Image (cartoon, grey):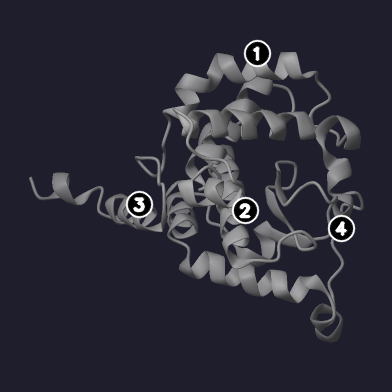
Amino acid sequence: MEQPKQEEEYGYDLFPGRNTGQHKGRSFTESLLTFNHKCQVMLQLATETSPYAKLLLSAMKSSGCKVFKERHFSCEDCDGTVSGGFDADSSQIVLCQNNIHQQSHMNRVVTHELIHAFDHCRAHVDWFNNLKHLACSEIRAANLSGDCSFQTEFSRFNFGLKQHQQACVRGRALRSILAVRKINREEAEKIVDEVFDTCFNDHAPFGRIPHDKKDAGFAGRDYENRGRYYANL
């Protein structure tokens, strides 16, 4: 049964462009005068040059969920507190054109949301009714997207802690859940704790935690060559 959209309950109030159910096209002139054109250009660069995004797009295609830029990405104005989101109702990634201004930020947002899309494809996540499913995908997205890489955390002046990756992933997953679900912090922390170890150690499709572009590039090469060893036996 189709799940009805509840703006406040499921976080749709953060994405006002989702409210209409339809996304009006913009003229070329109008796009040039807004953030939309810049968002589209950065999206194109992310999908063509980011090793993180390229691996995920390849993995989704292999899983039977090929991504089409015009169909599955939407640059929209959002609430000032978010940079992107995955709308499971429409299987569409929302990129917050008013909040993403640098290519490195766009690359991370595209990767983060593609991890949610990959989970949606491979695991049939019950986003609306099972908070453990949501927490698991948020943990994986924070862990594998570069959100908690040394370089990203250094730019936030967050570094030097023991098991910093785990602490960063836990904190970002918790904030994401609290942003889109009307539950208290204690309940959210309990849900994250219950699934953390399993989901933190699920590195699909990367096979490892990609700490930088070089790691992601190696992971992508390994993924593309995954069948060659057995094929040569």
The answer for how far apart the CA atoms under marks 3 and 2 are is 18 Å
| Among the two numbered marks 3 and 1 on one chain, the one whose residue lies closer to the N terminus | 1
Q: Position of residue 147 (x, y in %)?
A: 56, 45
Kind of residue sitting beneath label 1: Lys
Residue topped by disc 4: 22
Q: Secondary structure at mark 2?
A: helix
Q: Is residue 5 above or below residue 109?
A: above
Would you call the spot at circle 2 few (<14 residues within 10 Å), some (14-19), or many (20 or more)? Answer: many
The quadrant of the image that shows the N terminus is top right
Q: Residue at x 62, y 61 (%)?
A: 106
Q: Quadrant of residue 45?
A: bottom right
Q: Closer to the observer: label 4 or label 1?
A: 1
Cβ–Cβ under 8 Å for marks 2 and 1:
no
Q: CA distance from mark 4 to mark 1?
A: 37 Å
**Nearest the eye: 95 or 188:** 188
Q: Earlier in the sequence, mark 4 or mark 1?
A: 4
Ranked by sequence position, the earlier of labels 2 and 1 is 2
Residue at the spot of label 3: 215
Please indicate, yes or no, whether residue 1 appears anywhere in the rendered image: no
Which residue, given by chain and number where applicable, does mark 2 sit on? 109
Q: Residue at x 7, y 45 (%)?
A: 233
Q: CA distance from mark 3 to mark 1?
A: 32 Å
From the viewer's perspective, tell me whether residue 163 is left or right of residue 225: right
Q: Which mark is residue 125?
A: none
Q: Could you tell me how far apart the alpha carbons at marks 2 and 1 are, in whole angstroms?
A: 26 Å
Residue 11 visible, this orientation: yes
Q: Residue furthest left?
A: 233
- Residue occupied by mark 1: 190
Residue positioned 53% across, 56% down in the render:
66
Q: Secondary structure at mark 3?
A: helix
Q: Secondary structure at mark 4?
A: loop
